[in-house]
Amino acid sequence: MERRVANPRDVEAALNWQLERVGSAAWQDWPLKFQRMAFGYAQDSGWHDPVDAVRWLDHHALLQEGAAPRGALVWYQAADRIRVACSLGSGQVVGPLLRPPVEVAPLTTLTTDWVWSHPHFPFAH
């Protein structure tokens, strides 16, 4: 198993960062960058896009099914592509979802196909 290090921002600080940006259209089409920056990484994640991230996480057996805990990254299929959001718990996620502004929504309104991982950015800095 990969050795995980603590993110620069903990879960609650990352969620606060995201919630402060609800309504912003500046993150359209950048869901992975949004999550990386929420957890405190200024530089590239090392993954080209969410598809690349899911492949890497799957290869390292870091993806899980079921209800995502608060602060987990939720990887989901929507609009013919893989996207990522952050779990607020209780089935709610936050991030640049399907429409331009950052928003909070019930995951079940976005997709029926998702997996989750802990907020792990092995190549970010």
Image (cartoon, rainbow, N blue to C red):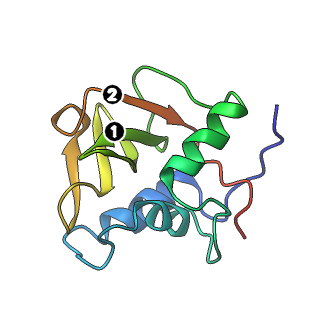
Q: Is residue 105 above or below residue 103?
A: above
Front residue (pair 68, 111): 111
The residue identified by callout 1 is 77
Task: Indicate the amino acid at tag 2.
Answer: Asp
Q: Is residue 16 above or below residue 24?
A: above
Image coords of residue 95 (percent x, y): 33, 58
Image coords of residue 23 (percent x, y): 19, 71
Task: Give SS at disc 1.
Answer: strand
Question: Which residue sits at x=50%, y=48%?
Answer: 51
Task: Indicate the amino acid at tag 1.
Answer: Gln
Front residue (pair 16, 61): 61
Q: Is residue 42 left or right of residue 90?
A: right
Q: Quadrant of residue 74?
A: top left
Task: Quote the CA–CA distance across marks 1 and 2.
Answer: 6 Å
Q: Is residue 56 left or right of residue 18?
A: right
Q: Mark 1–mark 2 contact, CB under 8 Å? A: yes
Quadrant position of the N terminus in the picture? top right
The residue identified by callout 2 is 113
Question: Which residue sits at x=70%, y=32%?
Answer: 59
